[in-house]
């Protein structure tokens, strides 16, 4: 047939490259309100839950058993379950109902009940609830620092810039697992150069991740994944109890950690049991709470292509963030993987966490060009810094970043690379040359830096590990070569393992290593004029972006 030129132009738009699919409940390709989702129910006999969401205890799977025995409050669950779900939804949004009261209600709802409750909310109501329910009053942000060449000096330089720009947590990963210790050390040294107190982690296989934490190469972990169906757990040779044990291993060594989950993971792995994505994610969150873990990284994360393809999927992602907060969990709320070709759509997805604020608005803003992002790219990267800073300025929102001067960024990138050069020299690692330092100081990404000898890097990493190297040797190396301030920062980071303050919910550090958490920075939002507000000092910084011109200069 003869084509409409308007429709032909629409087909050229980036969004036409996105994948969309109609709902398929049997395969778990439904975001919310699945026809096979169980009806909320609970029954207690002899102070023990014997029925949960339509199942008798004899029919419980491992998640049902764990949630019934370790998460739900048997003193309140029958009362809360008897309440009307729409009335509960109103309480969650109502500024006159305190966060503490809602938190108590959360532990009295079963997974099916909480999904039914949030199903009564639209996204604006959910955002209102998020503003009230996040654990820490002050919002924050986390970034990804990686590169295709696994170049250590580039990781250090990018980490320093990211920390200077305001990221409180920085995460790296690897293309080749043997690079993990090098990447972790590079990230830590760079981040502490950029801003004292920034927390760093390296997301790899769980045994290696724990070892690096024990050696003092990382400060926290979050890639300990939990799932909403028994079969997915079994496929990973895991149970809720084994994950709890792993969480205890981190905590016992003074390392902050949170679990990772997200809508769509079970459907992606083929074991959704015909349930909606949000219901299965609710099970993950209740399991997380029962394990005693302080927080969660959720918001679909690496599975976002699944909920992003079905109706109400992005709404479901906001709902899962909200449920986490209702359970008093730290929430690193996603926005960490690209899922669309549409700039409009990716910004709309991000605004639902950006506007109300979450503990970490991004689980990983790409602090590198997306082509270098080994987490498969984020919704926003370094090329979007000015756009993001402008959104903060337009809306008077603290999105976790501050404007920086080009000259200062160049200086801090150079310093971080030189600091790492000194560390590598003392640890017997392959040399970082002056040529490499010059390149990473001014680089946009790995296309601008020399290649490394991968085999030599691997040899050096292995020898360094075999010598029993820990964070103490890194401190000594930095101090020996004149980087006393960076050495002091790394040393202070190691000392926090003993203090344990940053094991509290939603903990971060300021540049004086003062711990800021849900304990001493408790969210007290109760309507206009309460809760977190952008201070005059911060607002002066946020207004002064590099694109803002002085009227007097324009006149001249």
Image (cartoon, rainbow, N blue to C red):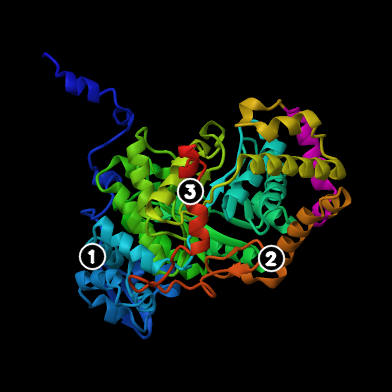
Disc 1 crowd rating (10 Å Cα; few below 14, some 14-19, many 20+) is some
Q: Residue furthest front?
A: 556
Q: Nearer the viewer, residue 235 or 556?
A: 556
Mark 2 secondary-structure assignment: loop
Instruction: Kindly identify which residue carries mark 1.
Output: 39
Asked whether the residues under the numbered discs 2 and 3 touch, taking CB atoms below 8 Å apart as contact, a structural biologist would say: no
Label 3 vs label 1: CA separation?
Answer: 27 Å
Q: Main secondary structure of the magenta part?
A: helix
Q: Nearer the viewer, residue 244 or 233?
A: 244
Instruction: Kindly identify which residue carries mark 2.
Output: 253
Residue 474 in magenta? yes
- First along the sequence among labels 2 and 1: 1
Disc 3 crowd rating (10 Å Cα; few below 14, some 14-19, many 20+) is few
Q: Is residue 213 above or below residue 244?
A: above
Q: Is residue 300 visible to the viewer in this orientation of the structure? A: no
- First along the sequence among labels 3 and 1: 1
Mark 1 secondary-structure assignment: loop
Disc 2 crowd rating (10 Å Cα; few below 14, some 14-19, many 20+) is some
List x then y, in percent, for residue 154. 68, 36
List x then y, in percent, for residue 388. 45, 45
Mark 3 secondary-structure assignment: helix
Q: Is residue 144 left or right of residue 210?
A: left
Instruction: Kindly identify which residue carries mark 3.
Output: 235
Asked whether the residues under the numbered discs 3 and 1 touch, taking CB atoms below 8 Å apart as contact, a structural biologist would say: no
Give the quadrant of residue 305. Answer: top left
- First along the sequence among labels 2 and 3: 3
Q: Nearer the viewer, mark 2 or mark 3?
A: 2
Magenta residues, start to end: 452-475
Q: Residue at x 62, y 50 (%)?
A: 163
List x then y, in percent, for residue 104. 37, 78
Q: Is residue 156 left or right of residue 346?
A: right
């Amino acid at each position: 047939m003869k084509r409409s030129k308007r429709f032909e132009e629409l087909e050229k738009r980036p969004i036409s490259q996105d994948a969309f699919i109609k709902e398929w409940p049997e395969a778990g390709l439904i975001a919310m309100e699945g026809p096979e989702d169980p009806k909320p129910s609970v029954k207690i006999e002899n102070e023990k839950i014997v029925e949960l969401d339509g199942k008798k205890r004899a029919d419980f799977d491992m998640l049902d058993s764990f949630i019934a025995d370790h998460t739900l409050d048997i003193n309140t669950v029958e009362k809360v379950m008897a309440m009307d779900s729409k009335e509960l939804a109103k309480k969650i949004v109502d500024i006159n109902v305190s966060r503490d009261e809602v938190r108590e209600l959360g532990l009295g709802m079963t997974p099916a009940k909480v999904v039914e409750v949030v199903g009564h909310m639209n996204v604006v109501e959910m955002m209102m609830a998020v503003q009230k329910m996040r654990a820490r009053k002050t919002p924050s942000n986390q970034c990804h620092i990686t590169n295709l060449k696994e170049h250590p000096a580039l990781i250090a330089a990018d980490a320093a810039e990211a920390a200077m720009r305001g990221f409180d947590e920085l995460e790296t990963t690897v293309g080749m697992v043997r690079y993990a210790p090098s990447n972790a050390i590079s990230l830590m040294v760079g981040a502490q150069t950029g801003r004292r107190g920034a927390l760093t982690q390296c997301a790899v296989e769980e045994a290696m991740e724990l070892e690096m934490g024990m050696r003092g190469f990382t400060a926290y972990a979050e890639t300990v994944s939990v799932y909403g169906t028994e079969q997915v757990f079994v496929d990973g040779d895991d149970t809720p109890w084994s994950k709890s044990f792993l969480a205890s291993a981190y905590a016992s060594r003074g390392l902050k950690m949170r679990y990772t989950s997200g809508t769509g993971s079970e459907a992606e792995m083929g074991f959704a049991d015909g349930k909606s994505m949000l219901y299965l994610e609710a099970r993950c969150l209740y399991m997380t709470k029962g394990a005693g873990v302080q927080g969660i990284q959720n918001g679909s994360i690496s599975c976002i292509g699944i909920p992003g393809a079905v109706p109400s999927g992005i709404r479901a992602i906001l709902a899962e963030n909200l449920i986490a907060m209702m359970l008093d969990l730290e929430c690193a709320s996603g926005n960490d993987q690209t899922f669309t070709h549409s700039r409009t759509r990716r910004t709309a997805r991000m605004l639902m966490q950006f506007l109300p604020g979450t503990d970490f608005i991004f689980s990983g803003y790409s602090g590198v060009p997306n082509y270098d992002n080994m987490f498969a790219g984020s919704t926003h990267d370094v090329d979007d810094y000015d756009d993001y800073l402008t959104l903060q300025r337009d809306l008077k929102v603290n999105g976790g970043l501050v404007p920086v001067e080009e000259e200062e960024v160049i200086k801090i990138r150079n310093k971080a690379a030189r600091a790492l050069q000194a560390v590598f020299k003392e640890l017997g690692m392959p040399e970082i040359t002056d040529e490499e330092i010059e390149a990473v100081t001014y680089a946009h990404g790995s296309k601008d830096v020399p290649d490394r000898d991968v085999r030599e890097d691997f040899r050096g990493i292995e020898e360094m590990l075999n010598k029993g190297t820990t964070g103490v040797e890194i401190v000594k190396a930095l101090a020996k070569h004149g980087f006393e301030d960076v050495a002091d920062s790394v040393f202070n980071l190691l000392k926090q393992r003993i203090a344990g303050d940053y094991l509290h919910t939603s903990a971060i550090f300021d540049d004086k290593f003062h711990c800021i958490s849900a304990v001493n920075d408790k969210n007290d939002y109760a309507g206009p004029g309460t809760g977190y507000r952008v201070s005059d000092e911060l607002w002066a910084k946020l207004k002064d972006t590099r694109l803002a011109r002085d009227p007097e200069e324009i006149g001249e």
